[in-house]
Amino acid sequence: MGQKQQLIWDLPALDSLKINAAVYEISDREFWERVGELTEMLSLEGKLVQPVRKLSLGERMKAELLAALLHRPQVLFLDEPTLGLDVNAQVSVREFLREYNQRYGATVLLTSHYMADITALCDRVLMIHQGTLMYDGSLNGLLERFAPYREIHLELAQSVSKEKLKFYGDVKHVEGKSVCFIVEQEKLTRTVSRILSDLEVIDLTVTEPPVEEVIGKVFEAGVV
């Protein structure tokens, strides 16, 4: 499923689905069973009888997904499936794709610039830069390979100078009593212990670096 619309703009989505059913020689019984199941999974009840032009962008995207899945393909190609959708619609589409994959075992090949799509759906990640395959593996493996560090986010009881904070690691930013450090993974436990011993900490969180930041650095370097 790409960015090109397959549903007929001025007709109800259901009419376009019937055309697809005829093309793929889907029987009437199978057609209504599949439409009913996918309509429920996509929360499109009552929407398929409306002209496509009257549907919201999120509803049109879901209807396009239904049309693409009507013949139950074993391999599904998705190009930016959440492009332009609001946050709630993005989450809804991701949840549907995850459920569909688990229910039918279909292989989903997804291209997206939204890292939330990747982190939510992809077990295997391929990074391609200027025609060269730079990485093929798990998302965790990508982070371990290209970002062997962690971020420590602190909320302190009182402000501390940036010069003093540099003693504990690379200071990413300081905003009042909020501080973020970048620390090499092998030094993480020792650094956290030192911070808790020396500073009056209200809250401390350790996170992985943002995926988009890691990928950006890899593309910027141009090498693996």
Image: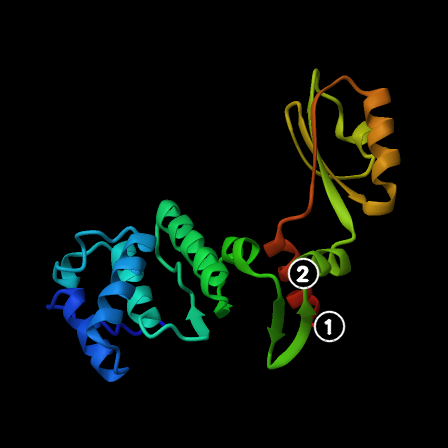
Q: Is residue 162 left or right of residue 88?
A: right
Q: Residue at x 74, y 60 (%)?
A: 146
Q: Quadrant of residue 15?
A: bottom left
x, y percent for residue 132? 64, 80
In the rendered image, which quarter contains the C terminus? bottom right
Alpha carbon distance from label 2 to label 1 = 10 Å
Q: Residue at x 19, y 78 (%)?
A: 19
Say what amino acid the circle numbered 1 marks.
Answer: Val
Q: Which residue is mark 2?
A: 217
Q: Is residue 78 above or below residue 43?
A: below
Indicate which disc residue 174 carries: none
Q: Is residue 162 left or right of residue 75?
A: right
Q: Residue at x 76, y 60 (%)?
A: 145
Q: Is residue 96 above or below residue 202?
A: below
Q: Which residue is mark 1?
A: 223
x, y percent for residue 105? 50, 66
The colouring scheme, among rainbow, by chain, secondary structure or one colour, is rainbow
Lower position in the chain sequence, tag 2 or tag 1: 2
Say what amino acid the circle numbered 2 marks.
Answer: Lys
> Viewer-proximal residue, 18 or 130?
18
Q: Is residue 54 above or below residue 154?
A: below
> Viewer-proximal residue, 105 or 175?
105
Q: Is residue 221 left or right of residue 4?
A: right
Q: Residues within 10 Å of mark 1 (few under 14, many from 20)?
A: few
Residues at badges 2 and 1 in contact (C-beta under 8 Å)? no
In the rendered image, which quarter contains the N terminus? bottom left
> Viewer-proximal residue, 132 or 135?
135
Q: Is residue 201 above or below residue 216?
A: above
